[in-house]
Amino acid sequence: MSNQTSSNTSTKTQQPLSKRELRARAQAYISQLQGETFPNSVRRYLQDEQSDIQVPVRSIQLHPTQQKDGTLRENAPLNVYDTSGPYGDPEQSLDVLKGLPKLRLNWIQQRADVEASPLPPYQEISLDEWHTEFNHQPLRAKAGKTVTQLHYARAGIITPEMQYIALRENMGHSTEPASDGVRTHRGHSFGARTPKVITAEFVRQEVAGGRAIIPANINHPEAEPMIIGRNFKVKVNANIGNSSVSSSIEEEVEKLVWSTRWGADTVMDLSTGRRIHQTREWILRNSPVPIGTVPIYQALEKVNGNVEQLNWQVFKDTLIEQAEQGVDYFTIHAGVLQEYIALTSKRVTGIVSRGGAIMAQWCRIFNQQSFLYQHFEEICQLCAAYDISLSLGDGLRPGSIADANDEAQFAELRTLGELTKIAWQYDVQVMIEGPGHVPMQLIEENMTEQLKRCHEAPFYTLGPLTTDIAPGYDHITSGIGAAMIGWYGCAMLCYVTPKEHLGLPNKEDVKQGLIAYTIAAHAADLAKGHPAAQLRDNALSKARYEFRWKDQYNLSLDPFTAKAYHDETLSHEGADDEAFCSMCGPKFCSMRLNQQIAEEAIDAG
Amino acid sequence: MSNQTSSNTSTKTQQPLSKRELRARAQAYISQLQGETFPNSVRRYLQDEQSDIQVPVRSIQLHPTQQKDGTLRENAPLNVYDTSGPYGDPEQSLDVLKGLPKLRLNWIQQRADVEASPLPPYQEISLDEWHTEFNHQPLRAKAGKTVTQLHYARAGIITPEMQYIALRENMGHSTEPASDGVRTHRGHSFGARTPKVITAEFVRQEVAGGRAIIPANINHPEAEPMIIGRNFKVKVNANIGNSSVSSSIEEEVEKLVWSTRWGADTVMDLSTGRRIHQTREWILRNSPVPIGTVPIYQALEKVNGNVEQLNWQVFKDTLIEQAEQGVDYFTIHAGVLQEYIALTSKRVTGIVSRGGAIMAQWCRIFNQQSFLYQHFEEICQLCAAYDISLSLGDGLRPGSIADANDEAQFAELRTLGELTKIAWQYDVQVMIEGPGHVPMQLIEENMTEQLKRCHEAPFYTLGPLTTDIAPGYDHITSGIGAAMIGWYGCAMLCYVTPKEHLGLPNKEDVKQGLIAYTIAAHAADLAKGHPAAQLRDNALSKARYEFRWKDQYNLSLDPFTAKAYHDETLSHEGADDEAFCSMCGPKFCSMRLNQQIAEEAIDAG
């Protein structure tokens, strides 16, 4: 996955802030976000009957419908899936220097298969200059133990993580979701099968079958369990992370929290700049969502960017360092084989994956097979000891429409399928990364080939962008492809921001990318026939039809923008109560005319 | 089609401008736009060998590629389809008070089948207060003559309009477009057949068969001919027009010109506010693209918004008035039959088309069949005398996901198919309007039903929006659906702006809507396998790979935004020449690493 984030704040014209100032700003920013909940939304917790598991949801409160006879009819609040973690709960008191509460620590310890890790060499890297109090004690599997959710699932064990996920995916309905008499469309699911009610046992089965993963490193107990698989709600990933030319640690933490507010189900920290370890520590300790990384970036940074100094040992040390910090999934480009590199020579844009390009260059320099491929089983052993999921990277993904679905791409995909089987032998959870740039008529082939070659392991794609001609708007060019591939069965969509191809996104870009991708994911859920997806559409459209303007805003993905746009042309006091807007004005409002027709129909009997 | 435009300029806090000031501002604005051509683009004219026909294109000039041996290899300029008319030609001298040159007047007169229209009653409406010099002399068909492009096409006549369109659609290639050795994907066209080279005879055949229309009122000679049909480039429409609560005539003219700059192939003037006639006159005389309207809006305005005072006579007078002004296509909701209204009673959002709601209310009040349906043959006779195309409106389109593809919608569609056959009996060109709000899995059925029921008449859809939950971002929710239905065969996509459902869009919203929709249309062209579509993607991706930053910007849909985004984080002098950007920085730039790999491959033989 190729995109990351920067801050909008230009440091060119200002004095750089001191660490103390930056830290205070991050804390102030996060406190402020936590106070600013979505309008008329309240944090609720879904409770499991048999356990103490509590799953947060955002419950959008609605106004009653004014009926013709003047009486009011209540509208039930709508629960929506909430990725914001403790930041979405105004009653929690949070401190970015201490990190989030360790939600999963008891569950992990109660399994009695982990032990404290000895002090590793990377601990030389001091975090002290930030005066943090993270108190992170790395764990690892006891010798001979495997601690992955896949291992438990195959053993028939339903973990608290699985119970949590069942509650979370159902959003509070324990029977078929009520549609209130509204016509609900049948989906077309391309073979996906989401049951009307998701049980913990269903979650277990999907994980056991390799069709879904729960990225949940034992060293990231702060994260709320979530699942990635095509028989569940389609998920969205946001990329953050600094580069050598832009942004600071505190800005990245701000972007993390901001991302979870706008619907990021997971976040990748793609930092390639200075202080990669420290940035990641801050992010992990403060993240309620799983964190992914591309470890080769830090490995390369450790050898000062010299590909000729990269080797298995540096890479392995990096994996252990990140494993003990708590990274939940690793993107590893182990499918970029030496013999595939020549297949890219006729391409318009060659190799556009950074990880893929690094490995291709390494193979060229040493005229050797990729060390990621050669040492893949060791990687799996390591992942099994922490429950790190593998996200097998598509290092040869197409970077332009012309290069889509070519032999280089599909050769690598077949290798990823072989690696999937190896990982599964080690009880390691796997998902597969996908492109990239693909014209619409070639998207479905990506999904069907992936399902076939990779044995139904979950697919995780970047877009795809359906055309190359709109830099500055690639959240849209790719939102189209993302919605389609989500419909076809892709389990998680990696966002693309408007800055893609042009620079590091700032916070506003992160939000724009996430909105485009939550649209795509929801459109995909609707098209697949996810049992509860249409409820939000129904509630919003009903509010729109009844001129409950505030409910319409509040049910939308971005209530602030919806209200601001409305008020731009009609902002007098009481405009939110009027039965028209500036688009048509009162006389030409079809909704209003229509209500008159409906009333006449009732009058006429 | 339901959306329109307003100005961002708040008049609440300022003194209203005088007419003179507004006019001066409009002229200044348009002059300024005309001066600001796209960077490194030049206006060229494609010349027909046998005639004096000249078709404008925007030719994007590119920098040479620096080759490894230090020599330069030229990159051929790329011609792109240009909707901006004379405004895109810095050498033309234009005056909004006089209107554009009358490109087609000679062609129309040479056919010798028209005569001057007698002074009609609407001429009482004075345009004098604006001191315009439009000098518009309305024409109509001579008694017994039919002046439609469909009539000529059926008679085997290739008109200059058809020749113009053949040149325009080919964009300068007279043989199969050269792909420069780059892999070109085969499209999946769902039965559409775009030839590698479009001839005037092919255009004639498509028009004769009813599969394409050329909206070209004899009273709008200023418009440059264009074609709407699924065997041609997918087109985009922008809606402008005031409402009773917002915007002025001059602002609408600014938005017209702005729309043609950003790729609007046609523009609908949906004014419902004051001075509808005058607004339209300004728009028509200054528009290089066909103009569509929904005449029922003005008819209703003439009876002060009282539906009970609407009747056939008022409507017919309105049609004649607009016909003589030069409207190129009429949206007429003649398929909203009295008996269909009850079919909407169970809907979540009832009837959301303004025209549909007006007619439904009229039928209810009078307990009569729609006068549009009853007098449909008279409407056709009138259209045949001016060559106005009919855009048969979908008055019962779904306004929410829940209401998609229901019986009300499809009952009306079948009636539109019957009306299409009637219109064709009168040699009147027809297209069919479509929804609206449709989840992805139900989009294809809209297209296949439309082709089947409406005998392959071109389809023209509003979106469709693939979810209801993102007001403020409906250019994206609908851009997804628009790209898909364009791929399936929809001939023209009516844009949706970010302000949809919330208020009248301003100029920035118009631009955002058009960019989203030109992306959708281009993605559709690529997916269908339009022979020349991929050339622009290839050129841009090649520029990107070769770090020709300026070429990358200039080949994009919005060079200004692409450059601004890049410069936000890396704006020092010379940044446009560097072989990396702030996203990855120099060490992690895959494109750069990749070029090293490619060079090594060359070195290694």
Image (tube, coloured by chain):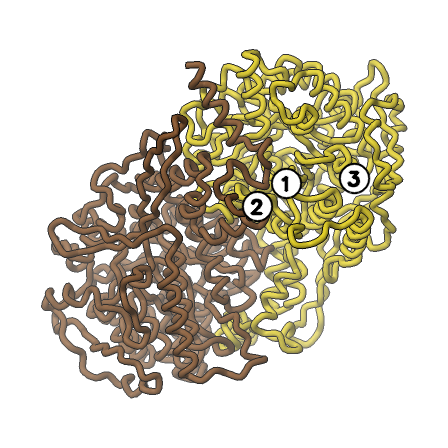
Chain colours: A brown, B yellow
Q: Secondary structure at mark 2?
A: loop
Letter of the chain that mark 1 sits on in the rendering = B
In the figure, A458 relative to A353: above or below? above
The residue at 30%/73% (across/down) is A95
The residue at 59%/31% (across/down) is A587
Amino acid type of disc 3?
Answer: Trp
Q: Kindly report the distance in space between the C-alpha atoms of the residues bearing marks 1 and 3.
A: 20 Å
The residue at 84%/41% (across/down) is B130
* Residue B282's disc number: 3
Residue B478 horizontal/vertical position (percent) = 52, 43
Of residues A360 and B91, the one drawn nearer to the viewer in this rendering: B91
Label 1 with label 2: CB-CB less than 8 Å: yes
Q: Secondary structure at mark 3?
A: helix
Residue B185 horizontal/vertical position (percent) = 55, 48
Q: Residues within 10 Å of mark 2 (few under 14, many from 20)?
A: many
Residue at the disc numbered 1: B245
Amino acid type of disc 2?
Answer: Leu
In front: label 2 or label 3: 2
Q: Is residue A122 left or right of residue B517?
A: left
Please tell me if label 1 and label 3 are on a single chain.
Answer: yes
Of residues A88 and A490, the one drawn nearer to the viewer in this rendering: A88
Please tell me if label 2 and label 3 are on a single chain.
Answer: no
